[in-house]
Amino acid sequence: MTFTRIEADENIIQVRMENVEKNSLPVADIFQTFAKYDVNIDMISSVNYEDSLRMDFTCDDSSSKALNEAIGEVTEKHPRIHIFTKRNVGKLIVEGEEMRDRPGVAAEVFAILGKHMIPFSQVTTSEISISFVLHKKYIEKALTVIKEEMK
């Protein structure tokens, strides 16, 4: 498998919002608030529970002050939501055009991470990429083993 990009960004913040109302209007309002504070959001993922959502996203750690201000406004407007941040994480990106037509690439990457006991706390995918949020202490190891084992 040939990847066009395997790299990491260690300058991110992961945000987890729990107990988000299952309705597009409050979700839109929440993300409009982050946009108002110029927080550039990446890696959005969600988990659908019976009566609520959990939404996770990442942003650049240079947005830390703006993020904190936006979180304050979001929790004021939506008091049911609990928001948590992780600042000791990084993002690992594995990308390649070949992924579009090759089944099982994600399974291979998951197996490599598992074999080397590298946990992740969030994953998002597109047709040509997989992005993981990992604790910073695992970033270099993950880069090395994926590059070695996905040749």
Image (cartoon, rainbow, N blue to C red):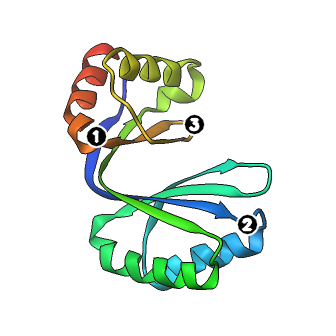
Q: CA distance from mark 2 to mark 3?
A: 29 Å
Residue 52 seen: yes
Residue at the spot 62% in from the left edge and 78% down from the top edge: 79
SS for dot 3: loop
Comes first in the chain, label 2 or label 1:
1
**x and y percentages locating residue 22 in the rendered image:** 77, 62
Please state which amino acid type lies under the numbered disc 1. Answer: Glu
Task: Where is residue 14? Give x, y as percent.
Answer: 41, 56
For residue 151, say whether it is visible. Answer: no
Tag 2–tag 1 contact (CB < 8 Å): no
Disc ID at residue 116: none
The answer to whether 104 is drawn above or below residue 15 in the figure is above
Task: Point out the tag, 3 or 1, that comes first from the N-terminus.
Answer: 1
**What residue is pinned by disc 3?**
127
Disc 1 marks which residue?
A: 7
Place of residue 26 in the rendered image (x, y in percent of width and height, measured from the top left): 71, 74
Residue 86 falls left or right of residue 70: left
